[in-house]
Amino acid sequence: MENLIVQKYGGTSVANAERIMHVAKTVSDTYKKGKRVVVVVSAQGHTTDRLVEKARGISSDSNRRELDMLLVTGEQQSAALMAMALQSLGHDAVSLNAAQVGIEATSVHGNAQIKRIRTARLTEELEKGRIVVVAGFQGINRFGDMTTLGRGASDTTAVALAAVLEAELCEIYTDVDGIYTVDPRIVPTAKKLDVISYDDMLELASSGAGVLHNRAVEMAKRYRVNLVLRSSMSEIPGTLIKEATEVERLAVSGIAIDRNVARISVTGLEDKPGVAYSIFDPLAKGKLNVDVILLSVGEGEKRDYCFTVHKQEMGLACEILEQNKEKIGYDTLITDENLAKLTIVGAGMANNAGVASTMFEALYECGVNIETICTSEIKITVLIDQRHITKAAKAVHDKFEPMFSKDYTQTEDA
Amino acid sequence: MENLIVQKYGGTSVANAERIMHVAKTVSDTYKKGKRVVVVVSAQGHTTDRLVEKARGISSDSNRRELDMLLVTGEQQSAALMAMALQSLGHDAVSLNAAQVGIEATSVHGNAQIKRIRTARLTEELEKGRIVVVAGFQGINRFGDMTTLGRGASDTTAVALAAVLEAELCEIYTDVDGIYTVDPRIVPTAKKLDVISYDDMLELASSGAGVLHNRAVEMAKRYRVNLVLRSSMSEIPGTLIKEATEVERLAVSGIAIDRNVARISVTGLEDKPGVAYSIFDPLAKGKLNVDVILLSVGEGEKRDYCFTVHKQEMGLACEILEQNKEKIGYDTLITDENLAKLTIVGAGMANNAGVASTMFEALYECGVNIETICTSEIKITVLIDQRHITKAAKAVHDKFEPMFSKDYTQTEDA
């Protein structure tokens, strides 16, 4: 649809009446520029946390279908309030929940994926000149039950809507003014990026830079949605996330820090086919997201696997592995919660042999020991003692500063 | 459906986790007796009021469609929490909102009426042995938009479900243990009724006895639903509301008190056809519920109409009348907010000429002046100075006490 902009506002941006009115004015300004607008909202402030607490007050292990039924109300409330705010500014606005839009998703409660979005109601409302406010974070499965798309997934709702409606732009409004080369709260010399490629953003998002939901970036990449991350509190342009060009690939984009890491080592495994499957299949069935996976380069008969999970999921991961101990056939589980993850990301890394060694040099110079290394074509991740993460991030960022200065603004007209 | 009981729990009964668990145990006990159970819940405690406040924080005059979209989340939350509580007791339970059940209603946001209830999903879930928890107070219109059925209308949801599912009983659990001859907080000698007829209950409910939503009673009467009002906090049997027999009609059932009354007098009207229509049609279009209507028995050319509305709707009513002043052609509007309404109800009243005079005698004896009188076949309503309402209620109740003692327990086997 021509002239269509999808704007997503997070929980902080809609936390109270005053902020909702502020957002409504931003939406109104966009509309007055001749744009059609679809607004996606998250639940207000800490609403989702409070609802989770309510559920825990009833049962420590709530049924996920019912939990979703409870949680989706938060976004529906925000959507209704936002529509009222737009109406108070004289606009014709309408709020829609996932069932009303027809956001069809899988049945994995708490972590569903969008399968299809019906566009009939949306286009009908937009063609009436209405501003449509959609409750983020939610879908319906084929039985008509409410499902949620995972924490932070309102970003994904926004990108998916931008994709199916062929919007010219999807703007994610948040409490930071763009993507930085590293978390500026930790490294004050961090630089804001004007442009970043989907791939680099994906690695940053996946590596713990919490500003954008990684499924949202994946989807933006797949459907070529022009994505902008910007602040709802300021006029600063933000960071544009788009397809990379060859020139851009030379740069190192940024550094991600993740403190929410626990490492689990599974030791004394036989060196035979099927072992990895026996470990990771039950974890996957338990809906656990496993990150960095390493297999020891053993000489003898026995080998060790180690991998990382979110800290709050370590208990569940160990429980699942203990239940499958006989089938997997391991000796012991060793856990470590005192680690942090430091990742540098850059689409040009594959063509630049010096990147890894530059990173290791920086860590060596500041005296930080590397526990584990894991690399991909466009990123290098190290696990280090979490007490040293600030020092390490600063050292690595300083080391790469000359590369950051070759940022995309020099080669892009965006 | 055989062996089916519909139980409705109000906001106080589900106000916190502890109370929800208490209700879940009551539901569980019913299920264990071999019954199928549909549970209807209201929003927790003051949730609806808080949501209305939120809307007012955005706009003093919220769009009613959006207000409904906001308000329905309260009941959905309660339903999800109740399903979790039942699951924690080992039951298979599922919560459904109005869209999922298919509770089709009119589009009058804030005061919609149920048109039809689809039973496919309900019977499917019940036949799986599940306890079904339905979010009360809500419906969907033909566009799939959420509508609400008016404050207190979760009772109506419960009765409507009991009607379409042909339940053997509909139990309304509340914070009082039954229907009393008069509000026991005002008249301590009030007696609890074991049985009352639909008609008498309807008059009591319509006259301000706030225990049951009058549309719920109307619907129960129309579809012959056996309705019980009882306390969720005690084992006391409650009051059964059912079809009256001839014998029962001899009794005076109870006394209703309503302090939420404002009287509006429209004076100096011409005495010609169409005047009443010109007054009450715009009020009806403004969705105002007008109660007691009186036309002065004038001798001269001009006549006066007076009627009562809820206090909070007086401003709106006057506004509407002023907008239509020319069309109606009246002199002045006179308002009085210092009145209260006292009503005695009894299906047998029509055959008992002495009832009205007994009431007037009681009021005369305690020195209370009657401002307005309005009678129907089964009730007598007087408007009096609200400062005297307690004194008046006691005097009238004492006077009728011998009639209350001929209550239904003597003639009923219920």
Image (cartoon, coloured by chain):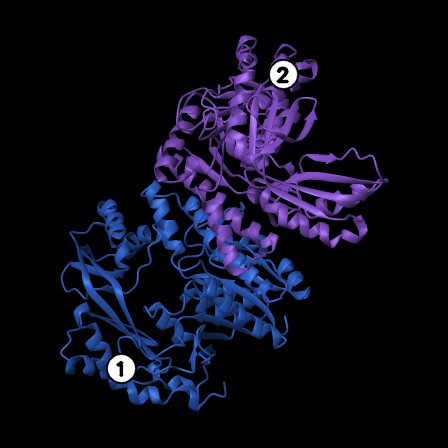
Chain colours: A purple, B blue
Give the SS element for disc 1: helix
Residue type at numbered disc 1: His
Residue A288 lies left or right of residue B6; in this view the side is right
Q: Nearer the viewer, mark 1 or mark 2?
A: 2
Residue at 46% across / 50% down in the picture?
A50
Residue at 63% across / 10% down in the picture?
A247
Residue type at numbered disc 2: Ala
Mark 2, other Cα within 10 Å: few <14 / some 14–19 / many ≥20: some
| Chain hosting mark 1 | B
Residue A150 spot, x, y in % from top left:
59, 41
Q: Dividing the image into 4 quarters, which one contains the N terminus of chain B?
A: bottom right
Name the foreground residue: A40 vs A405.
Answer: A405
Q: Place residue B387 in its image quadrant.
A: bottom left
Residue A108 spot, x, y in % from top left:
66, 46
Above-or-below relation of B158 to A313: below
Residue at 55% across / 13% down in the picture?
A407
Asked if residue A225 shows in the view, the reply is no
Q: Could you say which disc has been placed on residue A244 in the image?
A: 2
| Chain hosting mark 2 | A
Q: Could you say which disc has been placed on residue A105 in the image?
A: none
Mark 1, other Cα within 10 Å: few <14 / some 14–19 / many ≥20: many
Give the SS element for disc 2: loop
Name the foreground residue: A368 vs B200.
Answer: A368
Residue at 33% across / 45% down in the picture?
B56
Q: How many numbered discs?
A: 2
State the separation of the CA atoms marked 1 and 2. 84 Å
Residue A21 lies left or right of residue A321; in this view the side is left
Residue B76 spot, x, y in % from top left:
51, 54
Residue A298 spot, x, y in % from top left:
80, 35
The residue that disc 1 covers is: B397
Above-or-below relation of B78 to A108: below
Above-or-below relation of A135 to A176: below
